[in-house]
Image: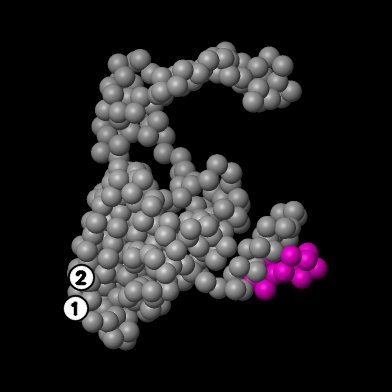
Amino acid sequence: MGSGPYKLAEWVRGERLVLVRNDGYWGKRPTVDKIVFQIIPETTTRVAMLRAGQLDLAYSPTPADVPSLEADPNLTVTRPLSTRMIFMGMNTQKGPTADKLIRQAFNYAVDKEAITDKILFKVAKPLDGPMPPSIFGYTRMEKQYDYNPDKAKALLKQANFSKDTVVKMITPNGRYMYDKQVAEAVQAYLKDIGVKTELRTYDWPTYSSITSKPLDQTEVEMYLIGWGFPYYDADPYLLMYFSSFVHPPKGLNSTFYLNPKYDQAVGGARQIMDPATRWHCPCTCAPSKDNCL
């Protein structure tokens, strides 16, 4: 604290955070003397204050507000992609989604472009890999799940999926932008390919409790979740949602994905400091640098 271009001057919990210029900063001197972060939880209030000139900048308006804000000649809307991902997790060890063919079918069944365009008003983009493109280590997945309901139905048939099966889906309500609406859209797309689902919504504390149960206790089959990290590195994305090191209750991998080779690769990359080596580390990478390409 205080080693950057600004230092803390005042903090009133739940009201404001005030930063002032640090004249002793070692780098380039900032041009703004003081920054006041006002804590305004209500989105409509933030937008109203912005329009009235009471704020210079307002963070995270609702997607529905964006078109009218962009039409206002007195305002500028920027859409930088964040490091947060929103996705549907599927239990890989028990329940109907333990079958890889069924998981693939569900991926083909959902029109991700339509969800980001129509529900999220284009303030989000479909992911093409396990992390946002701004992250160090990002690589576009070679296999993409385009919207293809016919292929989804064929995969279900190949998996002998029973139409009497009811897949359990859960989502938080209000934790992420339009989380419940996104889950409902996924539910509708699955219905289009003949899959019955039971969707339940929970407040965040209850939801966290449900998704943190170990495999022998969990009833989670499909769940909507979000993940973002403050530093731009692949490690927290690859570790937290695909590694067996963090199966609940140890961590957040409620898919219970289990792949020893993957664990070895992630564990090895965590001990390598050279960026170029980490980038090219293959799936058989061990902690020794000599074993990496």
Where disc 2 sits, the SS reads strand
Q: Where on the picture, by quarter, is residue 277?
A: bottom right
Cα gap from disc 1 to disc 2, whole angstroms? 7 Å
Q: Residue at x 71, y 24 (%)?
A: 27
Q: Is residue 244 above or below residue 15?
A: below
Q: Which residue is drawn at 31% across and 19% down?
A: 49
Residue type at mark 2: give it: Lys
Q: Mark 2 points at which residue?
A: 196
Give the percent coordinates (x, y) of residue 63: 30, 40
Crowding near the residue tagged with mark 2, few <14, some 14–19, many ≥20 C-alpha atoms within 10 Å: some
Where disc 1 sits, the SS reads loop
Q: In this view, does 221 lie above or below 203?
A: below
Q: Report the side of 114 relative to 13 (left or right).
A: left
Tell me the chief SS of the magenta region: loop
Q: Where on the picture, by quarter, is residue 48?
A: top left
Task: Choose the circle earlier in sequence order: 1 or 2.
Answer: 1
249 in the magenta segment: no
Task: Please state, as top left, top right, bottom left or bottom right, where the N terminus lies in the image.
Answer: top right
Q: Mark 1 points at which residue?
A: 164
Residue type at mark 1: give it: Asp
Q: Residue at x 55, y 66 (%)?
A: 244
Give the percent coordinates (x, y) of residue 149: 26, 72
Q: Give the range drawn in magenta.
A: 280-293
Residues at discs 1 and 2 in contact (Cβ within 8 Å): yes
Depth check: give the residue in front, 85 or 226.
226
Depth check: give the residue in front, 185 or 244.
244
